[in-house]
Amino acid sequence: MKQEQKRISDIFSMSPEGQSITVYGWVRSVRESKQVAFIELNDGSCFDSLQVVVDRAVISQLPQGLRTGASLRAAGILAESPGGKQPIELQAKEIILIGESPEDYPLQKKRHSFEFLRQIAHLRPRTNTFGAVMRVRNTLAQEIHSFFNERGFMYVHSPIITTSDAEGAGAMFRVSAEAEGAENPEFFGKPAYLTVSGQLEAEIYAQAFGRVYTFGPTFRAENSNTTRHLSEFWMVEPEMAFCELEGDMQLAEDFIKALLRAALDKNHRDMAFFDQWISRGIIEQLEKVANASFEHITYTEAISKLENAGKKFEYEPHWGMDIQTEHERYLAEELVGGPVIVTDYPRDIKAFYMKQNPDGKTVRAMDVLVPRLGEIIGGSQREDDYDKLLARIKELGMDADNYWWYLELRKYGSTPHAGFGLGFDRMVQYVTGMQNIRDVIPFPRTPGNADF
């Protein structure tokens, strides 16, 4: 009978009817009794490993034996497992060692510190924790594309190299040419940088296609060594023409709920692992947010609530300040007891492109706050008035010549438009409960660290 190769995730959904199958994977552990050996085999397709039971004689015939970390091919009969830890097992007739693993394989123990695993980023995906993180990350990435595709958004690839600073913060990586004999280090004829955001370019396409989104890498040259910052990270940024702040807030709420629901529905075992070992109660917390109606509060109202909270904050709240993480968490966790959207921030603490309110003091900005994290989405209605945008650029001392094309969007068929940005890695961190953002991206880039 022909033996069909199967992924382990497919095997667990099969009925053990004596089917003849072949499976490939990496050895998590090997236990031996007098007559048989028990191999815990994982191929990354799901959280659980498959128990492979094989006669010890088969193992003894392998020239180097069989150790943790080795890759192999196992063929045999699928059967019900008499043990209580797994429903089925593979009773192997043949074991072929594909890649041996020496005794110094670093992942011998069941538990390792995350700090240690960051030093072996080429091997950490084989652990339970990082396998679960990356499967959830994959689910969320797929859901992002599905969510926007179902709503008629076009996926736009915004440039990684740019001459514009979307935030006006200046913390950008500069791009220069190092070609031998190059006379002009400015390869593009003017200073160029790695992008901090795809928003400005997305606005171009929103003014032609109505609804677009970007999803790609962005870069910040901030010397921040915290559990929340990366030098290279991924951003999701939708932009919508003929849309004001109210529509922007509704999309943001629907988006967060769709992402949470996808992880909860499609990654049961991975989420159960996080709930047990990483962040107790995280499934219930995410369920509450996924089923909640997001409350709305203005920045001015939020500051008043913070000033009268009767609570000692590290940063004393006052109107005109940028709300800190401790304030965001108080608003979401204690004041509202769920997700909340804060709107209409002071213009002086927000980016130049945000729509100015008639009061002359605030802009049509919004931040989505969730319990346990604080801000998870930041967005705004964009300024669509040419004269107001130009005046704001000059007021901030920015070079208007660098934004000539951005200004021209306000000259030729301008529309009310809005959008937001979601830090994808921070979303993965929120869903998994991982404490350090360096542990939710395959290859973290931080100050002093660009290995792997």
Image (cartoon, rainbow, N blue to C red):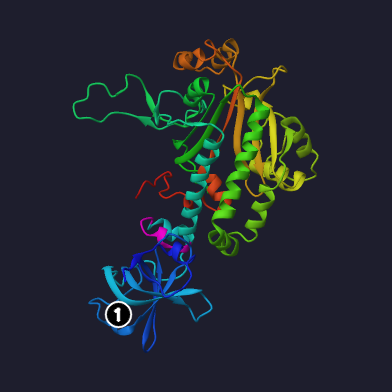
Q: In what element is the residue under mark 1?
A: helix
Question: Which residue is pictured at 40% across the width and 72% down the height?
Answer: 19
The reply, left or right, for residue 142 in relation to residue 126 is right
Q: State the image coordinates of residue 356 (x, y, percent, origin top left).
A: 65, 19
Q: Which residue is mark 1?
A: 59
The image shows residue 384, relative to residue 252, as above or below, that is above
The image shows residue 399, relative to residue 166, as above or below, that is above
- Judge whether residue 433 can be spotted in this image: no
- Residue 256: name its quadrant: top right
Question: Which residue is pictured at 51% across the width and 14% down the height?
Answer: 407
In the image, farthest residue toward the front: 1
Question: Which residue is pictured at 63% across the width and 39% down the height?
Answer: 254
The reply, left or right, for residue 17 in relation to residue 60 is right
- Judge whether residue 230 can be spotted in this image: yes
Residue stretch in magenta? 121-128
Depth check: give the residue in front, 222 or 402: 402
Depth check: give the residue in front, 50 or 65: 50
Q: State the image coordinates of residue 260 (x, y, percent, origin top left).
A: 60, 48
